[in-house]
Amino acid sequence: EFCNKTSAIKYLFKYITKGVDKATVVLENKSNDENEIENYLDCRYVSACESMWLIFKFEIHHQHPPVQRLSIHLPGQQPALFNDSSDLEQVVSNCEFRPSMFMAYLETNKIDPDARNLTYVQFPTKYVWNKTEHTWTKRKIGQSIGRLYNVHPSSGELYYLRLLINHLKGPTSFEDILTVNGIEYKKFHESCVARGLLDGDEEWHEAMTEAATWATPQQLRELFVMLLVHCEVSSPLKLWNAFWKCMSEDIVYQQRRLLNFTDYDLSDVELQIYTLIEVELLLFQYDQSLSNYTDLPKLDKSSIGRLSNTLFFLYGPGGTGKTFVYNTIINKLRSEKNIVIPVASSVT
């Protein structure tokens, strides 16, 4: 499998974590006292092609160029790794004299003018991290790229520090990162505002864009809802229009499985409705709904308020939204001060 598109990255990395090929085997026993469950074994299946490839020790996968993962932390919060038997004073001493990867990056900028022309993410292209000495040294051979660890927007100051580091070149200290036009701010959020990085919804679009390269549709929907609830998005509609397709990538697959119909397809309008239902269910967890956001698309509930003395039979496979319909009708009637008693028939 040759990965030649950025859109294939998510699929590729999830695919290789599924493990080896498997086959289900049944052991037949002529005895009348059979345990059918125990007779089925979940076994690894190795084909002739795979056997030959492994015997000759051919390369199974290749990754190029190497990726240097870059860590960041707030002032005084650098990680410290030690054993249970380690002396606490020695651990503290090691933290003081052995800088973290991010602190070593700041120190390198102080003494090397060439380093100040690079952002933190660009740093591994010209410098190599020495794990033993905890220092950055100039790269002589090879190539590498940097990748900052993902930080969720709900992480507060750490998220804003990451946002600043993606834009700044050559900072020499935390104070340098906090300083804008000679004014040292107390918080990284304030520094972001002073640099114009939080104008409009740009940061939320960047957060969704980055997450879309690796996150599942469900995780994207959860992030979208979290941004709506906690991050004061000025234009939810623009954010929705930009990313609703990424958030709906699993909807068609889910419906095909539920209906057992492999050729089942949905129009863009239907796809949006199903995605809105998923978003609405997530908003319920925060005691909110789509109606709290005036410019977001709304679910079509025009039929709920119609008065008609008719008996309806609602039927569908599990997970298709029956409970959502029931709850919507019940909540609507109760909001009009009607008494609703949900009951269910049982068969014994």
Image (tube, rainbow, N blue to C red):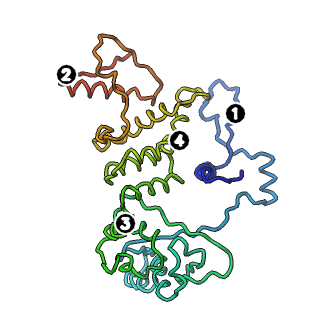
Mark 4: amino acid: Glu
N-terminal of the two: label 4 or label 2? Answer: 4
Q: Which element carries disc 2, helix, strand or loop?
A: loop
Residue projecting furthest to the bottom: 111
Q: Residue at x 40, y 19 (%)?
A: 314
Mark 3: amino acid: Gly
Residue 210 coordinates in the image, percent (x, y): 49, 57
Mark 1: amino acid: Leu
Q: Which element carries disc 3, helix, strand or loop?
A: loop
**In this picture, residue 156 sits left or right of residue 241:** left
Q: CA distance from mark 2 to mark 3?
A: 51 Å
Is the residue under label 4 in contact with that under label 3 (CB below 8 Å)?
Answer: no
**In this picture, residue 79 sits left or right of residue 41:** left
Q: Residue at x 38, y 78 (%)?
A: 174
Mark 2: amino acid: Asn
**Residue that numbered label 3 is attached to:** 196
Q: Residues within 10 Å of mark 4 (few under 14, many from 20)?
A: some
Residue 198 coordinates in the image, percent (x, y): 36, 62
Q: CA distance from mark 4 to mark 2?
A: 39 Å
Q: In front of the other: label 2 or label 1?
A: 2
Q: CA distance from mark 3 to mark 1?
A: 68 Å
Q: Residue at x 55, y 84 (%)?
A: 114
**Residue that numbered label 4 is attached to:** 249
Mark number, residue 27: 1
**Residue that numbered label 2 is attached to:** 338
Q: In front of the other: label 3 or label 4?
A: 3
Residue 127 coordinates in the image, percent (x, y): 58, 79
Q: Which element carries disc 4, helix, strand or loop?
A: loop
Q: CA distance from mark 1 to mark 4?
A: 40 Å
